[in-house]
Amino acid sequence: MRAYRMLAPGVARLVEVPVPDPGPGQVRLDVLAAGLCHSDLHVVDGGAAAAWRLPFTLGHEVCGTVAELGAGVTTCAVGDQVVVHAPWGCDACLRCAAGMSNYCDRRASLPAAGIGLGTDGGMAEALVVDATRLVPAPGIDAATAAVLTDAALTSFHALSGVRDLLGTDTTVVVIGVGGLGHVAVQLVHGLAAGTRVIAVDTRDEALELARRLGVDAVARPGPDTHGAVTRITGGRGADVVLDFVGADATIELGASVLRPAGELVLVGSGGGRLVVTKPGALPAGARVRLPFWGSRPELLQVIELTRNGLLQVETTTMPLADAATAFDLLRDARVVGRLVLAR
Ligand code: NAD
Ligand code: ZN
Ligand code: ZN
């Protein structure tokens, strides 16, 4: 079968590999869809894979159909449409037992960060995974279902920590309206009614998508953002900033528009720095959080929200054969919403 694999530092390619067999407790999925995340670029181009053993197949946002059951698997049946809860865990600590492998106590010493992040993922015709990682997703468009497992799950988890700060007469600034950010905008609207949203991006087409999603204002990073925050909040500042870029410039921008006792949520892995002790860098009482991915129970909630029509993921699909082109499009910032490799 074909698989888009990380072969060496900086080198990913579509190659031919044997179809994997499921071991005890595992299943083989026929992959229907695998999303491209900006984190995949950090892995391929940015050295995020340095600690992992190569080669492995990329793709951590996966939807598939159960094709073969390994010994002892009774929790799903051949033909089921499922998605994969992909954050890697030790499967032994209390966090893992609660479905929170994203915060596994042994995370720092694990050989991979997730399915498709240090171990074989879904940018292939088939994937073998532990049955315990599967979550049913029947009847949802496969490309959308794939994206729910990271872009939507991560945004949902990022927001879940700031629900106490949101609601009528509050304001969220979303920096980076890409795969994650465009979902976050919808989740704010759906879960925190009355909250105003200001979308910030460097690209017209991303701001256009934000406008279509009904945000209260769009802005470019810099003075334009300061102006929008002043206007929309009456000078108070934003209650929450969701930074889906995480570069020096966006972290500084986010911190500078935050209201006292607001929260700066750093989701993006742009490698930026925040000096929390510099006078004036953050307002009094500010909270800073570094959410990572999301739990299995949260994934179930995201799937339910999608079934209820609260979330419409903007997807563009391309065949697995065009994986290299798809990566180039993401690299060149020419993707609106999420790009998905799909059958
Ligand atoms: P994406 O490429 O789809 O979207 C990024 C968006 O940010 C684009 O619209 C781009 O135009 C915009 N942007 C880039 N630089 C900007 C700047 N300086 N100011 C304003 N906007 C800017 O990326 P994505 O897949 O949504 O991922 C976003 C980030 O989140 C990545 O760094 C990714 O690695 C990270 N991520 C983190 C987690 C986590 O668990 N913490 C999970 C998934 C992804
Ligand atoms: Zn991701
Ligand atoms: Zn664990």
Image (tube, rainbow, N blue to C red):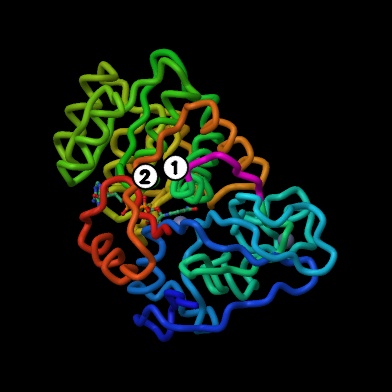
Q: Position of residue 48 (x, y in %)?
A: 43, 72
- Magenta extent: 135-141
Q: Is residue 296 above or below residue 285?
A: below
Nearest the viewer among 146 and 114 is: 146
Evaluate whether residue 227 shows in this view: yes
Q: Position of residue 329 (x, y in %)?
A: 24, 61
Q: Position of residue 312 (x, y in %)?
A: 41, 34
**Of marks 2 and 1, which one's residue comes earlier in the chain?**
2
Q: Residues within 10 Å of mark 2 (few under 14, many from 20)?
A: many
Nearest the viewer among 216 and 236 is: 216
**Location of residue 243 (image quadrant):** top left
Question: Is disc 2 in contact with disc 1, using a CB cutoff of under 8 Å?
Answer: yes
Mark 2 → mark 1, Cα distance in angstroms: 6 Å
Left or right, residue 114 beside residue 325: right
Q: Residue furthest right?
A: 72
Evaluate whether residue 288 shows in this view: no
Left or right, residue 332 beside residue 69: left
Q: Which mark is residue 243?
A: 2
Q: Secondary structure at mark 2?
A: strand
Q: Which mark is residue 265?
A: 1
